Structures are given as structure tokens and as C-alpha cells.
Image (cartoon, coloured by chain):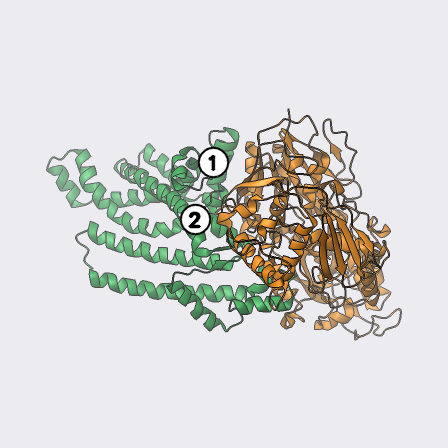
Amino acid sequence: MTIYIIKRLIAALIVVIGVTMITFGLLHVIASSPGRAVLGLRATPQAVAAFNSTHGYDKPIYIQYIRYVGQLVQGNLGYSYKEGQSVAALIKENLLRSAYLSGAAITLAILLSFPVGIWQAYKRNSISDYTVTAVAFTLYSMPSFFLGLLLIDFLALRLGWFPVEAAQQTNILAVIANIHAMFLPIITLTAVQMAAYSRYMRSSALDNLAQDYIRLARAKGLSERAVLARHLFRNSSLAMITLIGLSIPALLAGNLITESLFNYPGLGFLFFTALQNEDYPVLLAITLMGAIAVVIGNLIADIAITVADPRVRL
Amino acid sequence: MDSLNGHLPDSGVKPPRSIRRRSRWLAAGATAGALALVLGACGGSTPAANKSPSGTSGAKPTTSGNSGAAHLAGLYGTLPKVGTPTTGGTITVGQLKTSTPTYIMPITPAALASVYTTYDFINLMNQPIYWSPQGATVQIDNSLSIANQPVYSNGNKTVTITIKPWKWSNGTPVTAANVVEFIDVLKAAVKGKNNAANFSNYTPGFFPDNVKSATASGQTLTLQLTKAYNPGYFTNDQLDLVYAMPPQWAVSSAGGKQLPYTNPADAKAIYNYLNSQAKNVSTFATNPLWKISDGPMVLQSFNPTTGAYTMTPNPDFSGPQKARYSVLSVETFTSNQTVFNALQAGTLDIGPVGFSNLPEVSRISGSYNVYGMPDFGFEGMFFNFADKTGHFNSIISQLYIRQALAHLVDQAGYVRGIFKGAAAQGYGPIPSLPKSPYAPANATTNPYPYSTSAAASLLSSHGWSVKPGGQTVCKNAGSGANQCGAGIPAGTPLAWNEDYGNSPTVLGQQTIAFASAAKQVGIEISLKSNTFNNLIAQDNDPSAPTYINKWAMVNFGGFTNSLYPTTQSLFNLGGTYNLGFYNSPTANTLIKNSVSGANPTAVSNEASYLTSNLPVLFLPNPDLIWAVSKKVGGPANGFLNMTQYTWTPQDWYLLK
């Protein structure tokens, strides 16, 4: 297990390095002279040259990359000239809020989708199964921004039940406490995730319902509730572990739209603003974070499955 | 001097009078544009435009309610009421995240000055000594200015300014010495190699380099200039960069002793300290330096994450009107659509309205007054007079070619179709709207109205074989009156490329419409969209000669004029941002007269010539549109100046 994890970490490091090379190279192609973009058109060529020289943008790209990696190793993610702050500070300010939004959404999605999936499998091909399937497919095929727009339009603007924007507080505890304002963004993310999870859960539960151990459990006289809760739930959940692990970084992308839609200051909002401002150091850092999240998500999923399923040996 | 601007409300962003870069609405990239389109598509669809027959915006230029204000030409929509004010309460204003302030001191570095809101933010606490505009009229507002009008003597080489008896928020008087302090610290900031970018409005050789000495005696400030300047130019284009600095700022460390700023070394130390503090967004609201204000407001809180902030009225404000409400709360939004959502929900009192939301503006018209006006500047497609590809430099140097191209710009159609009526036609560097003392006679009527037949006729009469829908080529080479022109060989096709900004969509829409019209007379224009930053870093950068032959035309937006709308540095030979290397000896002379001559109408003469000579292909000037709750009122100028990227929130109040 330990050796496996070490191997995976080494592989992960290689992947992350590859991602940094690709993203750095692409951004260099887009913005080879940040001095002009940062200082504006009115800056003299001398001022632009001075800016590029001061910040090393006049050096060959491989030198710039080595410098960038050197800074990364020291925890320096760069400086946002547009925001006037270090990228690390910007991420620190926004990370907790995004983590709360994603975490709440993914937790709710899991809590709701698992029983729904099992229940659908148990009641397969019934009207209720078809109804839930229809709803799930509708939500699954719906982009989160569209669902969010619908929720804003109906629940916030027409009915006035919720505010049009998410909590604006800086303190994370205040944000968590403001359930009323956070309801719509969390539900938007939850609904799309839940639709996907419930379909997978239903499918996995259907497979397991046909297994011998379920028949054996029933033959032994266990109550249906015990069969579903003890045997079916646990074994069907195994397939979901990988899916959930892979969903964590995907939620970052989902946050970009949802946070922008609900005016919620988080990493997605930061990324969205950086896109608008062409704030490359921020884009680079968040892209890197996304890559690391994918790698870690995979790793956690792999480890979790070995813990949950004794048949899997690494 | 002009500067790249951001005219459109989609941006919410535009730098102030002297270094206004084409707004971040351009930089609001494809993602934002796509999202806005999707979001906008979900709204209702009600025509909102009030359009006059001429194609200029605003057929219903009214101030609603008991304003008593005169009808205003060119206004889109309806101004808020004057009404009866109440005291207390909170007024909330929306700003876009792309335009949140990131600096808090008047010597704003170029890197942090790309958004006009930074200046608005600063000016609420530290006013320039000359305030402009006066509502939507582009001139100094003497009542809001800290200084009386300057007096010129010694052949326009000496300027004497009397500072009014205003006070800082700590009760001490604003003196001429405070202005000298600003000038000395500014001089120290930009002095030396690589320091030009420390002041966004700095052009080497101009302010503060052109101030040989600044001395104070009580309330009298005397400036000795390095040479004679046109008083109109110096007052409106140079002195509008001048502020007063409180004496408490003359330190090099927290709690340090006040330094003699007249000593350049001390001035540099002061600047270094102030600069280090002024970019620290997390201490904006707590640093005692920024609590001293000569403006109408004092900062109370600032959220470094979102850029949202609150201000309270400065009780010692010496201007004509103190704010009547208790709190000004500026909230941050991701996009115009989220602002519009908040307006629909009624949670904002004042917010910008983007063009994508104009079709659904009826959703808020019951609760908000929506109005707009173009800002003082011009939009245009720029030519690259140096591009030798396909003999473009020779082609475009022909005035008749530029005139033919101008005939292919359907300004009325663009205003009506693309801008939904919220724009005004623009024919030159000084528009007829908003009103200014400088608009030339030919600013009001299009000298080159849309006509493909007129364009074809111009080409045919100069030796071109015009093939509508095909490829027009030079048939009769030579430099005679009926020939194509010098440097254009026979068989040369009228074909080149044009880049345009990928956001906002109106840039692309106008460019595509123009290219389609050009095709009707056999001109083949290859289009390519690009980001704003790439356009200014590559296509338009005189310092990037690699690209000199790679672009023929570009549409990135436009420029906002300074209060004195000379095109110095824009259309003069060697100008800092003469993007397309335009070179007209006549224009050079006229521009020089505007800056250094004594003729008060020099700048109008300059604009008149440029309007007919077409250094760029002029386009309509879009309105900056605002929605103001019907619960908020104030004098018309307090709202009109918002269309000119300036705030006077002390004029607003909650209505009874």
C-alpha cells in the first residue's frame, strides 16, 4: 500500500509538472509581453520594456518557466497585477468559500442520491422509478448555469423566496450561517450532481440486487430493510467512490459558472474575473490547482476503494 | 491628450480623463460574453431604445418629476427626479468585479489604473483641484473645484492659482503648500529610468516635467512652466491631474516625522512609502493615511476579496453639498447580468445596465429610471498607415480611399440595430454629444453618409475597376487626379485584413457589418477577432515592429478625450500612441497649436480637420447607461456626470 501510494505520488508529480509546462507555454503564447497588457497602451515602449525586464518576461521561455517552477516550490504562486495582491493571498481569501459551496453540494448530493438510487433499483420499472429517472435525466442534461438561471428567475425574482445573490460576507462562518442566501447556489450544484450520482447508484444497485449474496441474505430470513441497508447499500456504494473522487475537481469547474451566476466570491468567481481581466498569473495558479485536485481526487478514490472493498489489493 | 477608453456600459470600467483605456468590457473575454449572451437570452424582449430620427440616442431627453431641468439633447431614457430629499439611509451602488479599485492614492500607477472606478474611488476622498465635468457638459465645474480658475501671465509661462478655503476632514485647511507637496512627490515618483509607469497619466515632457517650479504662499500657488502653453490646454489637460496632499502624508514610515517634500530625496522616500501603502488593499479602510479626505466621502470598510466598500459622508467637506444619506455602499458583481438580477430584485439603488440587458429593461422600468449618454470621446477603426502588405500603406494614404470607406459605415444602422438606440453617431475626434465648448461645425452632420454608390463612385473616379461582390482592382495606376495614387501598381486589389476585439460583441457586429458593405464595392476585408490585450500588445503597439506589416485595420474600441480634446500623442507624428503611424503635416501643426499656441479655438480647428481627413474610420459613440431607483433623487448633474465616468454621490439622496 505504502509503495503504491509513493508510486502514485511520483506519477502525480509528473502529471502536475506536465500540466505546468503546458499551461505556462499556452499562456506565454497568448501573452508574450505582459508589460503592455498590464501597463496599458499609453505606456511608453521604454516603460513596457522596463516592466518586462524587471519581472523577467524578456527572458527566454524556458528561463521564465524554471523561475516559475522555482517560485512554485517556495509556495509563491505569483502576483496579480490586476488585483494588486499575491495570487496566494487571493486564493487564500476565496478558497474556504468555494470549499464550502462544493462541499455542501457534494455532501447533499451524496446524501440524497444514494437512497434515491437504491430505492429506484428496488422499485425498478415502476411509475415512480420512471418519474425519478425522467427528472434525473432532465437535471443531468441541464447545464448548471441554465438550472441556476431558472432557479433565480422563479424562486428569487418571481416568487421572491430567496435572494438573487449568494452570501456576500467575508467570514466563512457568516456565510455558512446565511443558509437563506446560499440555498440556491448549493441546490444548483447539488441537483446536477445528484442526478448523475443517483443514476450510477441505481445502476450499481441493480447489478448487486441480482447477486447471489442478496438472495442468500433474503433466504436467511433477513428483513428487506436489512438486506437493502446492510448488504445492498454498502456494496453498491463501492462503484460510487471513484465517481465521487473524480467529481471533486469537476466541482471547481462547476463553481466557476455557479459562483459567477450567483455573484458568490469564491475561486470560481476569481477565475471568472481573471478570465475577464486576462490576469494570467491567477489563471495559471487556479489551473494548476485544478490539475492537482484531479490528481488528488484520483488518488483518494483509489485508496478509498481499497479500504472499502477488501477484495481490492494494491 | 486622449486615451484609450471604455465607453460602453457593458464594461462599467473606464479610466478617467487622462488615461482612459478602452474599458475592460473589451477584456471581458469570450467566456463573459458567452455567459452574458446566454443570460440575456433568458430575459424578456421589450424594445427600450428612445431613438431620435438622426440616429443619435435619446428622443425623450427628460428629467422626470419635479426636476425643472431642461430637456437635454442626446439623453437616452429618463433622468431621476430632483424630488424632496430625506436625510439618513443607505444608497447601494453596483460595480463590476473587473472594475473594482485596487489603489487609493492619486499618483496611480499605470498597472493599476486600467479602470475608471479607481479614480472615482480616489476622487471621493481626494479631489483633483479642478473638477470636471459639469453634468454631461464637458467643462470644469467651478463650484466643485478646490481652486479658482488659473490666471496666466508671463506669456503663458506662469500660472497663478488661488486655493479656496477648503478643509481636510481633520479640520486643517487645504493650502497651496498641499498642492506643491503633491507636485513634488509626483516629480519624485516619475523621475529616473523605468519609473514612467509610476503615474498612469504621465507622458515624458508633460506634467509634471513641464512645471519648472511650484511655490506656495498661503492659498496662492505659482507654477513656472518650462515653456508657453495654450491656457485652454494647460488648464483642462494638465491641471486636471493636480491634487492636494495632506501634510500627514509627507512621511516615509508609519508614525514617522513629516519630511520636507521639497527635497527630492525626501519626496522620493515619501512616494515609496505612500505607494507601498496605497496598493495594500487589505488596509484601505484601516490605514490612518486614507482617513484624511478633502472629498465628499470617507472610507469606512473595504473588502479586499470582492472590492466592495462602504463610505460615509465627510462632515467637513467644503464643497457646495454634503451627502445627506448615512452610508454609501458599493457592492461588487460578476457581470452586468448579475447587476441586472439585483436591479430586478430591487436590492440595488443604482447600477450600470449593459447593452445585453437593454431588450429587457422594461422589467425594471417600473422601479428604476434608466438613462444614458455617450461619454466624451470617439470610437473608430484604426488604419495602419505603415503596413506595406499588398501596398496597403499607399492605398490608405489616399484620402479618397478613406472617404470611400467612411461611406461604407452605416452609422445610423449601427445605432439602431446594434446599439438599440443607445449610442450617438460620431464623425470625428470631438463628438457633438455630450456638449462641449470645442465641437467643430462638422461634428454635427456626417460628412460621409452611408452610401455604397458614393463609395463605388469615388473608387471608379480614381482609376479602380469596381466589381460589386467581386474583387475591385486598380486599373489606372499613377498619381494623377483620376488615377489610383502613388505607390499603387495596376492590378492591385483592394484587399486587407482587420482585427477586432472579441468582446463586447458590438465590436464584432460593427466590423462584420462594415466588411459586408465593403464587399458590395469589391473590397475584400479578412476579419479576425482577438483579445483586447493582444490587440494592444501586438497589433497596435508601435514598440512591436514585428507586427507592423501584419495588420491593416483594427477595431478595439475607442478613446476618451480629456477635458481639452486635443489628439496630441494620438495623431501627431511620433505621438506616444499614434497606433497607426498617421502622419499629416497639417494635423501636426494644428495639434501643436492646440497645445502650445494661444488661439482658444485651436483644438476645434484641429478636430475639424481630423473629422474630414479621417485618421481613423469614426464609429458611433455608445451610451453609458445607468439605472437609478425611483426612491433616489438628486439634481440632474449628479446623475448626468455618471455618463461621463465621474461620480458626485454627495448630490444623491433618498426621496421622501
Amino acid type at circle 2 is Glu
Tell which of A214 and B635 is nearer to you: B635
Q: Which chain is green?
A: A
A173 to A70, vertically: above or below: above
Tag 2 residue: A93
Q: Where residue A19 sits: x, y (%)?
A: 40, 63
Rendering quarter of residue B653: top right
Tell which of B349 and A261 is nearer to you: B349
The subunit letter for the residue under badge 1 reads A
Direction from residue A209 to residue B419 in the image, left or right: right
Residue at x 49%, y 71% (from the top left corner): A61
Tag 1 residue: A151
Q: How many marks?
A: 2
Between disc 1 and disc 2, the foreground one is 2
Direction from residue B591 to residue A178 in the image, left or right: left
Disc 1 vs disc 2: Cβ atoms closer than 8 Å?
A: no
B32 to B656, vertically: above or below: below
Q: Where residue A202 sits: x, y (%)?
A: 29, 42
Can the viewer see residue A254 in this picture?
A: no
- Counting residues from the start of the chain, the first of labels 1 and 2 encountered is 2
Q: In terms of secondary structure, where does tag 1 sit?
A: helix
Q: Where residue A72 sits: x, y (%)?
A: 40, 63
Can the viewer see residue B501 in this picture?
A: yes
Q: Colour of chain B?
A: orange
